[in-house]
Amino acid sequence: MSATSCDGPGCVILLIEESQAMAAPVCDDISRPAGQSAKPKGEAVATAINSLLKQLSDGPDFDIALVGYSTDDSGQAMVDSRWEGAFAGRIFVATQDMADNPAAVEQRIRKIPDRASLTGFREESVGFPVWYRSRTQGTASQVRAFQRCAELLAEWSTSATGHRSQSVVVHICAGASGDGNPLKVIDGIRKASIGGEPPLVFQILLSTSKLAPPTAYTGNRMALAQGAVRDVFDRSSELPVALVNAIREAKTPIGKAARGMVYNARLQDVVQVLGLIKTLTRGWPSRPIPVAAPVAPTVPVDNVLETVAVETTPVNAAAETILLDSVPVELGQADLVLELDPVDDEPLILDAAPREQAGLLVLVLDRSLGDPYAPNNESALQRLQEQANEILAQAAKKPTGQIEAAMISYGLDPTGEADVRTTFEGQLVGRACVRDNELPDGAIRVDVREENVPDGIGGLMKIPIKKPIYFELDPTPSGGMRAGIQAVSAVIEDWFAAHPNANSRPVVVHLTRGCSEADCDPFEAALESLTRLGDQVLLHHVVATEEPHPSVAYPVAEEELQTASLRMLCRLSSPLLGATELAQTGSRRISTSSRGIVVNAKLDVLVPSLRSLVAS
C-alpha cells in the first residue's frame, strides 16, 4: 500500500527495549569523537527518538505512542507508556499537541558545515525538546511487549472507524527475547486489519560489534545465515513502494520485496529507519477534528533516569534521515588510537646492533570468484578490495615513514596460467614496497563523495569524503594461490635483507573468499610455506564468503566457524597482533587468545597495533 491511499490519519507505536542490554555502549565509532566514551544504547536511542518526535510535531496530525518494556526485580514483565511531562500516563498523543508540551528543553551544541574552518564546521548552541528518557533494567519481555501493542492497536482502531488508515509499529531492541519467541504475536499483528490496512512492523536489532556489517532491507530470506538474522526478517513487514523509493533515492542498496528490518544496526541505521517513518507519515492526511487521546494505562509511568538528548536537523530530502552527535571523520579511515606495549616475543633474527624501528605490512588479495563472470555489485572480491583499500588508507593517515607496505594479488590469466601481481600501480607503479608516508600521494585515484555526518544535535551535515583507491582489479577463476604465496615469501626475504635489525615482525594480511571443501587441502598446503616461517611472520586473514555465514571477528577457537575451510584458515592464522593490550582495554570482544582472522567483518585494529609496535 502506498502512503497516499490513506484517507484518514494513522498511528505509530514506538516500541523500545529497556532491558539491561540497552545499558551497553553503542558499537560504532563514527558516532563519537576518538577517545570519547561511547553512550549507552538506551541513551543513544532516546536521542534519536526525541529527534524524530520534534520533526513529527510540525507535520500531519496523527496519534503516536511511546512504549518501553523490560522486567522488574522479580522478573515480571513491565510494558508501560513512556511519555513524560504533560503527557505522563497517556498512551496515544496527537502529534499536533507535542510541540507545545515537551517535558524539557535542553541546550546542546550543534555543528554546522563551514568550509572556511580548519575543522570543516562551526558550532552554535541550540535548544532541543525532550519527550522521552530511557531507563534500563531487567530482561527483554518481547512477547508481552507485542501483546500490549496488539491491544493498543485494537483500542486505537475504534477511533479510526470510517477511515482507511495505516498503523505502524517500530521495534528497537538490543538482543533476543527473554520470555519466548514473539513471532506468533507479531504475525497476528501483521494479519490484523487496523483502520482497514494491516499494520507495518519494523524491526531494528542493535549491533553488538562495530565489526559486524549491518543487514538492512533485504528481501531474500535464503541469502541470510540461519539464526537471529532470519528471526528479525520473519518478524518484519514488506516495505511499501513509497519507502522503497525513498531508500533508493537515499543511495542505500535495497532489493526486491525488501523488509523493514536492520540486523546489526548502527546508530545511523536506527536514524534512517526513523527517518522513513517521517517520510511515510508525511503522506498521511491530518485529522480534521481533534480527537481525545485514549484512556491512560492502569500502570503509571515510573520515574526514569535523566539522560541527555539532542536535536535533529533533516538533511536528506528523500529519506530525511537524522543522526546522532559526533565529530565528522572520514568513513573507513578513522584512526583507532591505541597505546600498546610491544609484543613479548623478539624476532628470530637477532643481532647485537641497535634495533631499527621498521615494520612491513603485506596485503595479499585473492582475486578469484566461484563465478567470475556473474554480474554482482556485492561480490566477495569487491568487499575484499574495499577492505584492502581501507587498510592502506589507514596506514596512509598519520604516516610515520617507519612502516612499509606491499600489495600482492593472485588469480589466473585468460590462458589459465597463474597471474600474480607484486607491485603498486599509478604513481607507485613498479614498486614492490613503499613507505607509509608515500601512500597519501600514491593511490590510483581518490574518489570524492559527499557524506552525511553527525552535526552534534541529532542532525546531519554534508562534507566531502576522500577515499583513496589502491586495489581495483577484475575477478578471475580460482587458481594461482601457490604462486601468490611464493611471491609473498620473496618480498619478506628481501625486506629482511634490507632491515636485518628490524624491531617488528612482518604482518601478512591474506584477503580471500576462502575455498570449497574439496580444495581445502591444496589451499592449506599453499599457506604452509608462510606458517613454516614461524615467529618471523604474523599471518592474518580477512574472509568474505560467497555463501551465507555469520560475522565472526577475532575468534578464540576454530569451533566458532561453521565450515572446515574456515576452521582451517583459523588454525593457520597467527595470534591477533596486539591482542593482549586490546583485551586489557575492555573496549571490544578481544581476548588474549584471539586469532588474527575476521569473517564477513572488518580487520580494524591491525594498523594501529603495528604502528604502536614499531614506534616502541
Image (tube, helix red, strand yellow):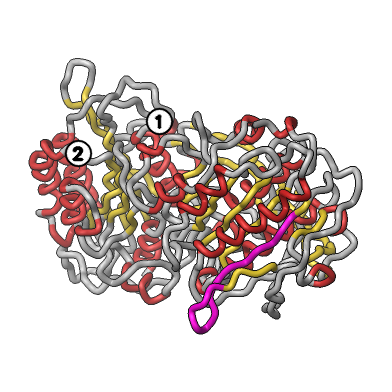
Examine the residues drawn in magenta and state their main secondary structure. strand
Residue 249 seen in the current view: yes
Other-residue count near label 2 (Cα within 10 Å), few / some / many at <14 / 14–19 / ≥20 = many
Where in the figure is residue 381, as x and y percent of width and height? 34, 34
The span shown in magenta is 64-77
Q: Relative to 85, is 249 on the left or the right?
A: left
Mark 2 residue type: Cys
Q: Relative to 573, is 29 on the left or the right?
A: right
Residue 36 seen in the current view: no
| Quarter of the picture holding the C terminus | bottom left
Numbered mark located on residue 140 in the image: none
- Please, what secondary structure does the residue beneath circle 2 have? loop
Q: Is residue 71 above or below residue 314?
A: below
Tell me which residue sits at (58%, 68%) in the image.
69
Tell me which residue sits at (23%, 16%) in the image.
414
Where in the figure is residue 94, as x and y percent of width and height? 82, 55
Tell me which residue sits at (39%, 59%) in the image.
605
Determine if the magenta segment contains residue 9: no
- Who is closer to the viewer here, 258 or 69? 69
Mark 1 residue type: Glu
Residue bearing the label numbered 2 = 515
Quarter-wise, where is residue 244 in the image?
A: top right
Residue farthest to the top, as pictured:
415
- Who is closer to the viewer here, 26 or 385? 26
Which numbered disc, 1 or 2, marks the residue closer to the eye?
Answer: 2
Quarter-wise, where is residue 504 in the image?
A: bottom left
Give the total of numbered labels: 2
Residue bearing the label numbered 1 = 472
Where in the figure is residue 326, as x and y percent of width and height? 65, 59
Q: CA distance from mark 1 to mark 2?
A: 22 Å
Where in the figure is residue 456, as x and y percent of width and height? 71, 59
**Which tag, 1 or 2, sits closer to the chain's start?**
1
